[in-house]
Amino acid sequence: MPRSKKGKRGSGRPGSLRQELLQLQLATKAPLKGVKNGVKGESGASDDEMTSDVLSHCSSASESASVLEDGPGGEQVDEQTAQEETEDKLKQCVEYVTDKSVKTRLAGLESLRQAFSSRLLYDFLTERRLTLCDSLERSIKKGGGEEQSAAATVFTLLCIQLGGGDEAEEGFKMLRPILTAILIDNGASVAARQSCARALGMCCYVSAAEEGEDLIKSLTLLESIFMSSYPNREGTLPTPKPGIPGLHCAALQAWSLLVTLCPASRLTVLLHFHLPKLQACLQSSDVNYRIAAGETIALLVELGRDLDQDFEVEEEENLCRCLKSLATDSNKHRAKNDRRKQRSIFREVLHYIEIDDFTEERIRFGVESVHIDGWMRRRIYDAFKDIMESGVRHHLQFNPLLRDIFGLGPPLILDAVLKGSKISRFEKHLFNSAAFKARTKQRNKVRDKRADVM
């Protein structure tokens, strides 16, 4: 291996004199930095180092397991030891949420978010849900905008982890008044209000779905947020303040998620009131809000057709004309990515409104897959994906709540034979290298045979 040209040769070796001196200096300074101004628990590292340390401690154990399994020796991971280490790190992260340092609290919340997204931790969280709810309540009440936003997201993941049972319902009832207060507070951070809107929608969906009163309250609250984007009596759309379209978008998406739970009587009223208003919102200046309005229109039309096969949209011709304009929009004053995203979504919406046809999507995870065959299932899947990001596939595979929602049944138990048949990364690399070499040889043969074309 070639040595780096930068720095003195030998300075990075474990036994070098330079490194031993540095370690000695750090060892002598560490006890002095452990207590600062009489405050217990302050570390000697900087806030950035603390953040990095917390995040590294609470990374997904599944990722480390896959790395060890694919190693050259094929070493087996001691799952019990890995589980204990993970729980110890998670306990540390829960303690960080109550730290006096803002950066430490944010790092702890980010670590919990990553851990809750990527793993199923029902047993661990059931024993500590009240402690964690108290810590999150304190962060949402007294923290800044960034901390409030992070705490609301972690609480949403906590409800999903608890599976929507009595434990999740108890936590939702505890934090719901605080989430509501921040959502309707015009002076609060816009990012915090967005996270609170998503938290109210998702937590109500998974923990209070059977409570009709809670469902109606949440729908009414979210309506009060995004309805301020509706046109006035003159038919003119209001000019939103910076950041507000994102809040309207989050509230509308959370509301549309809860609409999928509405009974037929309530749904009929919502269809007649909101469909005409949402059509006007297709002219919004914000591309994300236009897309959210278009997807919500398609969802409401689908629900209306499920109730009545003869359901018709008011002024359907005008709606289709507007959707066609958005699906072929080429205005140069809009960003290219925005135009591409908008055209793709509105082509699907227009296709569904005109001929009642939906482009199915297949989400693969493990040896299973989920079929997204309608706007309702897409809204539900997108809501979970927005919260859990890439971890949604792991939860689809193991989380009983998501498996029940998408009709997947109990989690599959894969035997050792099936797990052992999985190709390692090293074997994949060898296979791809051989295929690339064979493909290159074949193409070179063809290129060398330069025949005159008559």
Image (cartoon, rainbow, N blue to C red):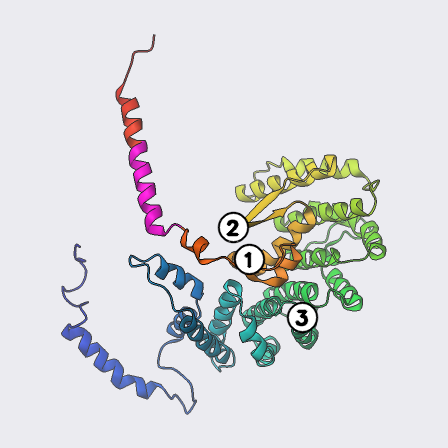
- The span from disc 2 to disc 3 (Cα, nearest Å) is 28 Å
In this picture, residue 74 sits left or right of residue 59: left
Disc 2 marks which residue?
367
Measured as percent of width and height from the top left, residue 340 is found at 56, 40
Query: SS of the residue at dot 2?
Result: loop
Q: Residue furthest bottom?
A: 38
Q: Quadrant of residue 453?
A: top left
Query: SS of the residue at dot 3?
Result: loop
Q: Nearer the viewer, mark 3 or mark 1?
A: 1
**Identity of the amino acid at label 1?**
Leu
In this picture, residue 93 sits left or right of residue 177: left
- The span from disc 1 to disc 2 (Cα, nearest Å) is 9 Å
Determine whether label 2 and label 3 are within 8 Å by CB.
no
Disc 3 marks which residue?
165
Q: Nearer the viewer, mark 2 or mark 3?
A: 2
Residue 423 visible, this orientation: yes
Q: Quadrant of residue 354?
A: top right
- The span from disc 3 to disc 1 (Cα, nearest Å) is 22 Å
Measured as percent of width and height from the top left, residue 139 is found at 57, 77
State which tag comes first along the sequence, 2 or 3: 3
Query: SS of the residue at dot 1?
Result: loop
Q: Main secondary structure of the magenta part?
A: helix
Q: Residues within 10 Å of mark 1 (few under 14, many from 20)?
A: few
Q: Residues within 10 Å of mark 3 (few under 14, many from 20)?
A: some
State which tag comes first along the sequence, 1 or 2: 2
In this picture, residue 273 sits left or right of residue 189: right
The magenta segment is 423-439
- State the mark number for residue 412: 1
Determine whether label 1 and label 2 are within 8 Å by CB.
yes
State which tag comes first along the sequence, 3 or 1: 3
**Identity of the amino acid at label 3?**
Gly
Q: Residues within 10 Å of mark 2 (few under 14, many from 20)?
A: few
